[in-house]
Image: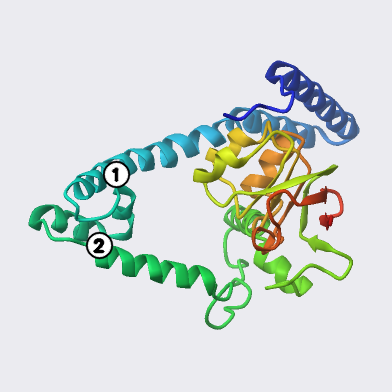
Amino acid sequence: MLAPRGYDPATDAAALAQKRAGAIADARTALAGRPAQHRERFERALARGEQAYPLREDNQFYAVSAPMALVRYAVLELGRRLATRGQIAGRNDVFFLELEEARAALRDGGKRRSLVARRKAERAWVEAHPGPASYGRDPGPPPSLAALPAEARFLMEALLWAQSRVFAAAEHAGHEGHEGHQPAARGALHGIAAAPGRYTGPARVIRSESEFAKLRPGDVLVCPMTSPVWSVLFPSVGALITDAGGMLSHPAIIARDYRVPAVVATVNATRLLRDGQHVTVDGDAGTVELKS
């Protein structure tokens, strides 16, 4: 069970509401001298954002996480039955079989232990020998959108802009020369500054949801990426470091929501950092200083 680091939801919500109100007031003041249509456009965008943004996490839960959990329960039951018969060593081994292979095993009663062992070995080899970030020739920039009607062109340009800010890790690594990089000589990792602030604490490398219990209040969460399932950890963490992501990626947005300093797109922090190692996360500079 995680113990939040002095987290009071009501106090935090009130502080966020006050900060939001101040930002809105500043925007309205800045627009006061602009034409009426500019002010109206801002108010429309603000109203839509306030209505739609709270649905972000709920949409992911109901559209992705909950259905996948139900499917997982069904597959685990299949694995339990195979394990009870001795066809596989444990129920989780069912995930090393394709669905039709598992169903066939249930019908014919044959053992699948050797197949599971081979698949486990293949996975271990792949994890020990990661491939490049991409394969094939670079397709180059996207085609021109000039032929589209103005509104369609604006929409496509906005989508491409947002996508580039979500999946920015590979681009960042390429520009900085960090693909497969090691810590810099001065003992630091570099990434994208995703949420402001500076924090020093022990790193905790968590690669999947099965390792959530490792996290302790005040730890620096180090992970490949996050999804809405990971949001429950944010009240407890002191800072965040991810391998992937951009300014509009899930970890960056949620870190800013919880005012947790964050650096994303470090490429390989999960491989370079170890549990308990003290690090300083600078969410303004996009750097992670490594302590001895």
Q: Is residue 200 above or below residue 235?
A: below
* 16 or 94, nearer to the observer: 94
Q: Classify the position of the N terminus by image quarter.
A: top right
User: Height in image: 273 above or below 15?
Assistant: below
Q: Nearer the viewer, mark 2 or mark 1?
A: 2
Q: Horizontal and vertical percent for residue 291?
A: 84, 55
| Residue 109 percent coordinates (x, y) | 11, 56
Instruction: Using the image, determine if residue 23 lies above or below residue 282.
Output: above
Q: Position of residue 279 (x, y in %)?
A: 80, 51
The residue that appears at 72% across and 23% down in the rendered structure is 7
Q: Which residue is mark 1?
A: 76
Instruction: Point out which mark residue 275 bears.
Output: none
Q: Quadrant of the C terminus?
A: bottom right
Sort mark 2 into few (<14), some (14-19) or many (20+) by Cα contacts within 10 Å: some
Quarter of the view holding residue 98: bottom left
Colour scheme of the picture? rainbow
Q: Residue at x 53, y 39 (%)?
A: 229
In the rendered structure, which amino acid carries the disc numbered 2? Arg
Q: Which residue is mark 2?
A: 113
Distance between the alpha carbons at the discs numbered 2 and 1? 16 Å
Q: Secondary structure at mark 2?
A: helix
Crowding near pointer 1: few (<14 within 10 Å), some, many (20+)?
some
Residue in the image at 46% along x and 68% along y: 124
* Residue appearing at x 71%, y 34% in the figure: 257
Frontmost residue, 143 versus 147: 143
Q: Tally the numbered discs.
A: 2
Three-letter residue code for mark 1: Leu
Horizontally, is 108 left or right of 278 in the view? left
109 to the left or right of 291: left
Q: Nearer the viewer, residue 278 or 153?
A: 278
Between discs 2 and 1, the one toward the N terminus: 1
Pinpoint residue 29: horizontal percent, then vertical percent.
89, 29
